[in-house]
Image (cartoon, rainbow, N blue to C red):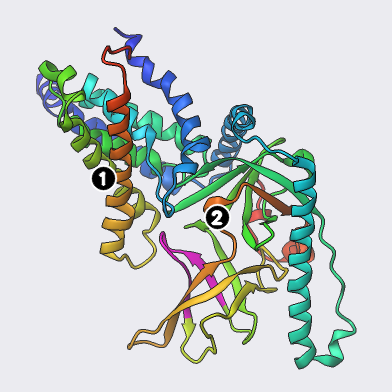
């Protein structure tokens, strides 16, 4: 059981590699899906809010240290996104939520919070355009991440290995 | 004690959340700290090494050497054309000074982008060349079209590029025609020269190049053209929207200009790249 909880950390490396090597080819007008967020939400719904918060912080730290983003920005946003996703954790419905459309709704909400928080942290010194912040930098990346998550859901094997 | 235990049991998620968010905020505020930078360089170098192993599998490039040669030639020609434009304008204004202007030669280091970190606010690239090739923080990164960004940090074998589309990127630029200077920055959705006086003669379609006044890039590299002039009714300043020449999202190969200009100037001026890491 304890080892199971370390699996997302092992999965994180190949997923981050996909994020920086393959995902740039999927960019649409500068918007890309966030694969690490899908991993984070999945395991938050599997193991609970507290676990998700800590996992979000650890994965965010790894992203910040291994890419050029502002140190602390991903830590902050991933922690917050996991907290939001954690509200939907239900001990008795772990398997069903992950395989239901609700999972995509949660991905969208967590993605929105993640993207908006990221923009707020990075943009704190300029006059913010609320439409741009919510739509271009919040909703669009969240939708794109949700679309990719739905593809993962559709094409993932019925039997769970992770 | 029991009370504390009750509080913990009831609010542990919130307490842990607040604690971790506070740590994140501390990191954000200390991201320019020397020891943090050093740790970041080490971890970035390690991850870049792993990325490069997989990058070669993904990027199959036929006629690699010939392409590289042509790209280099293209970039050199772009710089030459840009220099000639500069000379042309200066020739009209300062014919008598043209004779004493130094000739500048650029050493270009070709490099491949092995990974990209995309976000609306902070786009960075990792290159497959580093300190061993003579790359240093602060060097300009270009393509045949124009400026892409600057080297933010480098390990022995890899470099991290802060592109034009990064919120922490600030650069002194000028309108090549009217010679007005301004500070270019990325807002998260647009490249903008902000707070340009309303009296500045800027027209749509004007070429924007880096300014010699810049302590980061002291040579005139092309950046883009003026796409739109935002002219608010109130105040004394305009904002100018820039369309960059280089298509940041599609770039796969770049050149690093192996020169940090203003070396003498930098030794007497405050320049954040000269602070000891």
Residue extent of the magenta highlight:
B182-195
Q: Which secondary structure lies at badge 1?
A: helix
Image quadrant containing the N terminus of chain B: top left
Tally the numbered discs: 2
Chief secondary structure of the magenta portion: strand
B250 and B26: which is toward the camera: B250
Residue A94: tell me if it is visible. yes
Q: Position of residue B9 (x, y in %)?
A: 13, 22
Q: Is residue B23 left or right of residue B96?
A: left
| Local crowd size for mark 1, using a 10 Å CA cut-off: few (<14), some (14–19), many (≥20) | many
Residue extending farthest to the top is: A1
Examine the image and state in which quarter residue B154 appears.
top right
Classify B214 as above or below A58: below
Q: Which residue is mark 1?
A: A113
B83 and B15: which is toward the camera: B83
Q: Position of residue A75 (x, y in %)?
A: 38, 37
Residue B22: tell me if it is visible. no
Q: CA distance from mark 1 to mark 2?
A: 26 Å
Question: Label 1 lies in what chain?
Answer: A
Nearer to us: label 1 or label 2: 2
Q: Position of residue A14 (x, y in %)?
A: 48, 25
Q: Is residue B135 left or right of residue B148?
A: right
Residue extending farthest to the front is: B62
Classify B107 as above or below B252: below
Question: Label 2 lies in what chain?
Answer: B
Examine the image and state in which quarter residue A92 appears.
top left
The answer to whether the residues at label 1 and label 2 have Cβ atoms under 8 Å apart is: no
Q: Which residue is mark 2?
A: B248
Q: Is label 1 on the same chain as label 2?
A: no
Q: Position of residue B235 (x, y in %)?
A: 37, 87
């Amino acid at each position: 059981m304890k080892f199971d909880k370390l699996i997302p950390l092992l999965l994180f490396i190949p997923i981050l590699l996909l994020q920086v090597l393959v995902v740039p080819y999927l960019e649409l007008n500068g918007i890309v899906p966030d694969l690490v967020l899908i991993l984070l939400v999945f395991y938050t719904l599997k193991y609970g809010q507290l676990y998700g918060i800590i996992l979000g912080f650890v994965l965010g730290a790894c992203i910040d240290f291994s890419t050029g983003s502002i140190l602390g920005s991903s830590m902050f946003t991933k922690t917050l996104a996991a907290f939001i996703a954690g509200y939907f954790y239900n001990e008795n419905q772990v398997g069903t939520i992950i395989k239901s459309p609700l999972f995509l709704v949660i991905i969208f909400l967590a993605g929105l919070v993640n993207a908006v928080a990221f923009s707020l942290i990075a943009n704190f010194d300029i006059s913010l355009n609320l439409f741009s912040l919510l739509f271009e930098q919040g909703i669009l990346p969240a939708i794109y991440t949700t679309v990719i998550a739905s593809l993962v859901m559709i094409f993932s094997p019925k039997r769970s290995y992770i | 004690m029991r009370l504390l235990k009750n509080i913990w049991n009831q609010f542990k998620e919130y307490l842990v959340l607040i604690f971790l968010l506070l740590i994140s905020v501390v990191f954000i505020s200390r991201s320019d700290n020397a020891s943090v930078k050093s740790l970041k360089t080490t971890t970035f170098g390690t991850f870049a090494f792993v990325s490069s192993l997989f990058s070669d599998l993904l990027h199959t490039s036929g006629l690699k050497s010939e392409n590289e040669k042509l790209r280099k030639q293209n970039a050199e020609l772009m710089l030459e054309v840009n220099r000639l434009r500069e000379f042309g304008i200066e020739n009209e204004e300062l014919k008598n000074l043209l004779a004493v202007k130094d000739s500048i030669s650029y050493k270009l280091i070709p490099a491949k982008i092995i990974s990209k970190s995309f976000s609306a606010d902070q786009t960075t690239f990792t290159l497959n060349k580093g300190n061993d090739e003579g790359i240093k923080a602060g060097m300009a990164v270009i393509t045949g079209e124009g400026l892409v960004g600057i080297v933010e940090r480098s390990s022995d074998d890899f470099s991290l590029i802060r592109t034009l589309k990064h919120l922490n990127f600030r650069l002194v630029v000028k309108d090549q025609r009217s010679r007005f200077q301004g500070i270019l920055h990325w807002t998260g959705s647009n490249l903008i020269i902000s707070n340009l006086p309303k009296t500045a003669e800027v027209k749509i379609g004007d070429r924007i190049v880096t300014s010699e006044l810049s302590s980061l890039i002291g040579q005139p590299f092309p950046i883009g053209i003026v796409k739109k002039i935002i002219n608010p009714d109130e105040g004394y300043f305009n904002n100018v929207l820039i369309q960059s020449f280089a298509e940041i999202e599609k770039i796969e190969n770049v050149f690093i200009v192996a020169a940090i200009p203003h070396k003498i100037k930098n030794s007497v001026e405050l320049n954040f790249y000269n602070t000891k890491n």
